Image (cartoon, rainbow, N blue to C red):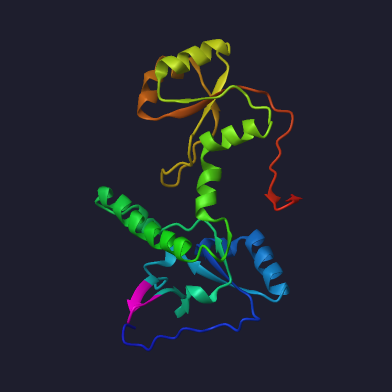
Amino acid sequence: NAHSPLITPSFPEVFPVILIIGNSAYQTLEAYGVVIRAIESRGRRAYVFKQDQCLKGAYLSYRITSGKPEYRLNIDGMWYAAEDFQTIWFDHPVLPQSLRRYEPADHRRFIDKQFSTMREGLRLLFSHKKWLNDPANVSRAENKLYQSSVACAAGFEMPDTLMTSDPEEVRSFYERHNGSIVTKMISASPIMDSVIFTKKVTEEQMRGIDSVRYCPSIFQPYIEKEHELRITVVGEKIF
C-alpha cells in the first residue's frame, strides 16, 4: 500500500546478515536449502530478494532525501536498507517471463536495462561490502576470450581455438583438423527457454558456414573425452 508507513528493520551489529539477490525458484532446490541451513547454523541469517517477483512487490528503490541517499529493497513485504547487510550474494537474478516476453519485443531490452542498472547501482554503492559472485568478477569469468587467455597464461594445456565470424577462417580451421571440430557459444544463450549445447560440425553445416557472419562462435578440434570433471574453487579449497 503506497500510504502504509515504511518499516525498515535494522539489525544488531553482532548479528551478521546476508542479502541474496536471486529468484524465487532457487528456494525449491535442495542444494539451495543446504546452503541456507549451513548459513543459519553459523548464527547468520539470509534474506532473499526475488528479482523474478518484481511485479508482485519485490522492489528496488533508491532515493535522496534532504541530501541523504538511501538504497532499499522490498523483501516479502518488508523494506530493508541495503546498508544494513554485511554480505551480498549475487545469485543470477532474472526478470519474470512476462517481462522477458514483453510485447512489443523491442521494449524488452529497454526494460531489462533499467532493472540491471538498478542492480549495478547496488554493486557500485556497496562495493566495500563482502560480495559472493561480484557481478564485475562474474562478467570477467564468463567471458570466454578472457577466460581462455588466462588459462594459457596459467599454464593450462589448451586445444587450438578459434572465435570468429569469418567463414573463411572456419573453413581453414575445419580443414586443418581433418573435418573433426566442434562449435559452441561464445556466451550464454539469451534465447528464451532454450539451451544450445556444444556439438560437432557436420559437412552439411560447413556448406552453410557463411551464416557464421551473423553470429560469432567458438570452434575447437573434437577431442574424445576420458573423464568429465566439474571443479569449483573457493579461496584455497577445491570441491
Tell which of 211 and 114 is nearer to you.
114
State the residue in front, 158 or 154.
Answer: 154
- Residue 237, percent from left and from top: 75, 52
Side (left or right) of 53 relative to 181:
left
Q: In the image as oriented, which residue stretches furthest toward the bottom? A: 5
Which residue sits at x=57%, y=55%? Answer: 133
Residue beneath the point at 39% across and 67% down: 54
Query: Residue most toward the left?
Result: 104
Quadrant of the image occupied by residue 28: bottom right
Q: Is residue 123 left or right of residue 100?
A: right
Q: Nearer the viewer, residue 11 or 203?
A: 11
Magenta stretch: residue 67 in it? yes
User: How many marks can you see?
Assistant: 0
- Residue 15's spot in the image, x, y percent? 64, 80
Q: Is residue 165 placed above or below 37 in the rendered structure?
A: above
The residue located at (58%, 13%) in the rendering is 177
**Residue 145 is inside the magenta segment:** no
> Magenta-highlighted stretch: main secondary structure?
strand
The image position of residue 103, as x and y in percent, is 26, 53
The correct choice, above or below, for 72 with respect to 103 in the image is: below
Question: Magenta residues, as a range?
Answer: 62-69
Is 72 left, or right, of 155 in this rendering? Answer: left
Q: Could you tell me which residue is drawn at 60 percent across and 36 percent down? A: 150
Pick the residue in front: 163 or 2. Answer: 163
